Image (cartoon, grey):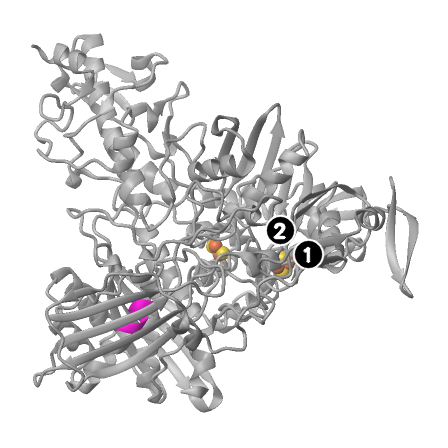
Amino acid sequence: MGIIAIGIQRQNRLKILVIMNSTIQLQVNGKKHTLAVDPATPLLYVLRDQLALNGPKYGCGLQQCGACMVLLNGKAEPSCLVPVAAVKDKDIITLEGLVRPDNTLHPVQEAFVEEQAAQCGYCMNGMVISAVALLNEKSQPSDAEIRAGLQRALCRCGTQSRIIKAVKKAAAKQQGK
Amino acid sequence: MNRRNFLKNTGCLAIGFTISGSFIDVPAPMFQDLPQSLKRHPNINAWLEVLANGQIRIFTGKLELGQGIGTAIAQVAAEELDFPIKNVEVVLADTARTPDEGYTVGSGSIEQSAMAVRYAAAAARQKLLVLASQQFNIPVDQLTITDGKICTLSGDRVFTFHQLLNGKQLTDNVQAPVALKPKDKYKLVGKAIPRNELNHMVRGEAYYVQDLRFPGMVYASIVRPPAYEAKLLKFDEKALQKTNPGVLKTVVNGSFVGIIAKEEYQAIKAQRWLQQNSKWSAGAKLPAARDLITYLKSLPEQPDEPSIKGTLPGKDAAWIKAQYFKPYHMHASIGPSCAVAIYDNGQLHVWSHSQGIYPLRNSLSKLLQLPTEKIHVTGVPGSGCYGHNGADDVAADVALLAMAYPGKHIKLQWTRADEHAWEPYGSAMIMEAAAVLDSAGNITSWKYDLWSDTHSIRPGGEANNLIAAQSIATPLKAKPGHGGGAARNSEPYYTIPNQLITAHIVQGPLRASALRSLGAYANIFAIESFMDELAEKAGKDPFAFRLAHLADERAKAVIRKVQELTANISLPANTGLGIAFSRYKNTASYCAVAAKVFAEPAKGIIQVQKMWAAIDSGEVINTDGVINQTEGGLIQSASWTLLEQVKYDAQHITSRDWVSYPIMRFNEVPEVEVVVLDQPNEKAMGAGEAAQGPASAAIANAVYKACGKRIRHLPMLENLMKS
Ligand code: FES
Ligand code: FES
């Protein structure tokens, strides 16, 4: 645990406050982590830089593109702005956490590979996470519901048509099980 | 001279006509034009190595940009060597390992790199058979390769490549003619082989430059000027240090300002603080108050030779005229540009998603005054780039920082605003078309003028065009790009006896460079919109009108295919079908596109419901690769066409996020259907840029059919009301 200084601007005078770098417990992919971190740090940086996870990606840092999606208590949420302190009681799942203990893929992941639903693949995290959350809520979504469910996630390579097919395939797989 | 001595004496593989393996009955063609890449790097082992673990390793100087080049290259290598594709490893662009193949651009990866690998692998095959014949004293025509092993035809003896070479590599030159595997024996090429990297991506394994981590790695951010050419006047470094814990170093070199911090979020916060707390000169003003069309046409032009055919009639002929416009577009990669670098022991190592790591190394050498031998650039995939985005610039930024803060790996991830505001855009363009029809409705004369900025300021081994180079203490002056790309596809592919085509190359207000398909997108948008306007004047159907003006059967075939695909669709009220065609660069892939669009101008609605494409890119290596690229091209082009334009005020770019520069989201994305017309006996041509142009015009033509509005200025949604 380190000591860090943060500055705040108040009445045009700069005051330097010295605070403790908090210890935060996070539940990520089924494991508890105790981390020394500035509690204001957005979750994304903690996941990527401290926990060395690659799934959530930096895209905009503005909650506009979905590249950084994670599951927070089963719901797909961007991780690029939410302070890590605000999610310490949540169950956080990243793309890595969808892979099963026997190393096989989650049906949604499987469907993305089968449909080759990527070009550069940078958006894939947001797409897969959004799709998992969607299918948790609605096991057999219509086309319009799939589009709505993935609306927050951008793809610049233009692979959306494949992604829609992949989500449908995943829905069918999950129903078959 | 016997065969063996002949080979030994020439030291090369001129063997197509003397030696055979399982291709015994296949004479090599007498004339083969080897790809330039291969001519520059003629040794087999520049492209291919046999590994002890039973694998082969293929080297390409191209980078994976999401176009699937790694898979395509593995396919051709495995095919020629009859090798299991799962045991083919492909090493992408690295200045220490792979051939220098310049830039990964212009849909050239298949034409150059994959073809170089094809010849190298074929030459390796022949050489391996000869070696086996010599070592085991078996006539070469009794040997063949099956499943990656050399075996006798009877199957009683089997040798692996590695056994045969015993740790050595094949160093012979590949020389034409080389016997290639006959195409009717192909098992992998022309098939939809899945891209293996998706398995890694989908698990969140480290794959992108953004995923690189090194022990002790530190994080950087860059503070750009608030305007082009603005100079840093002052900032209080002490206050920065005080208010921003974790900052390890501030690097100030003229007006180039970088921050290095222990943690990534600290670097970002320090960047924000500095943006608020630094003073800059005013910089260059942008002509925000002026209409961009009038402004671009008022600028001085680079001299350019017009292209002329036949003789045009005078002013009093019945000219039909129209003016089209395309604003500045962004590459708008989902992951902003990123690079990692370390300067240690006099050596600089940079990891970059640049499209040209060898040119980048030369540019860095000039920027840093460091000899190229001291610079190692490793290509690592990034987010899809679609041309010249911020990749080279971020690499230069981080290299400067690494030199100033040696001994540590430094990661620089540009922010969304960094990328949006500073990447080089696809140039705005004005296109003015005019034509004369004869009484039978044929186009007899064609006059076309285009105004555009450059379509390439790629650094090309110089440092001048790197953003950082223009800000450092001894700044370099930006070099004007070349105008060539602006005229791409400015000549119609149709048979028109009299033509005059003039490109007016100007230096526009914004930083511009290569965006997917360069000028072809705007030129085809204009030409193919105009073709529909002319068809209407001639009283002809758009399919028939185009077919009547085409001589090339392959061009006609893609158009007929799209006609067939859309023959039975229903078109309810306010719905229209539009088509367009082009042959990319007039020498590469043929692509016809149809769009079904619902349009309601009163409500400002244009909905592209479905798009079809038929594409002929010659010999197809990976069918799914061509389909994927074409589907993506349709959707990306639909987004450019309907929604996109870079906005700016007098000071700088105001499109700095996804709200101020919207791109298509799921609710707007059309359904797409792509048919590939494979031509196994034709030259393989890149497919990645073929759909951009025709997709835009097909939408414009469909909007017109749907609601009677001819939208000639992009983006369509904004101009729908105005028209
Ligand atoms: S990075 Fe979080 S939404 Fe874009
Ligand atoms: S596959 Fe590249 S951004 Fe979606």
Q: Specify the subunit that label 1 lies on.
A: A
Q: Is residue B271 left or right of residue B324?
A: right
Q: Secondary structure at mark 1?
A: loop
Residue range corresponding to the magenta coloring: B522-527
Q: Is residue B25 left or right of residue B144?
A: left
User: Which numbered dot is residue B79?
Assistant: none
Disc 2 marks a residue whose amino acid type is Pro
Number of marks in the image?
Answer: 2
Q: Specify the subunit that label 2 lies on.
A: A
Q: Which residue is mark 2?
A: A56
In depth, the one of A118 and B516 nearer the eye is B516
- Identify which residue is drawn at 20% across, 19% down: B12
| Callout 2 crowding tier (Cα within 10 Å): few <14, some 14–19, many ≥20 | many
| Callout 1 crowding tier (Cα within 10 Å): few <14, some 14–19, many ≥20 | many
Locate residue B97, reporting x and y percent: 43, 28
- Identify which residue is drawn at 44% across, 74% down: B295
Q: Is residue A36 magenta?
A: no
Q: Is residue B166 left or right of residue B640?
A: left
Q: Is the residue at mark 2 from the same chain as the one at mark 1?
A: yes
Corner quadrant of residue B656? bottom right
Q: Which residue is mark 1?
A: A79
Name of the residue lying farthest toward the bottom: B602
Question: Mark 2 or mark 1, which has the lower sequence index?
Answer: 2
- Identify which residue is drawn at 31% across, 56% down: B484
How would you classify the magenta stretch by its main secondary structure? helix
Disc 1 marks a residue whose amino acid type is Ser
Residue B496 visible to the viewer: no
In depth, the one of B335 and A17 nearer the eye is A17
Q: Are marks 2 and 1 in contact (CB under 8 Å)?
A: yes
How far, Cα to Cα, is label 2 from label 1? 8 Å
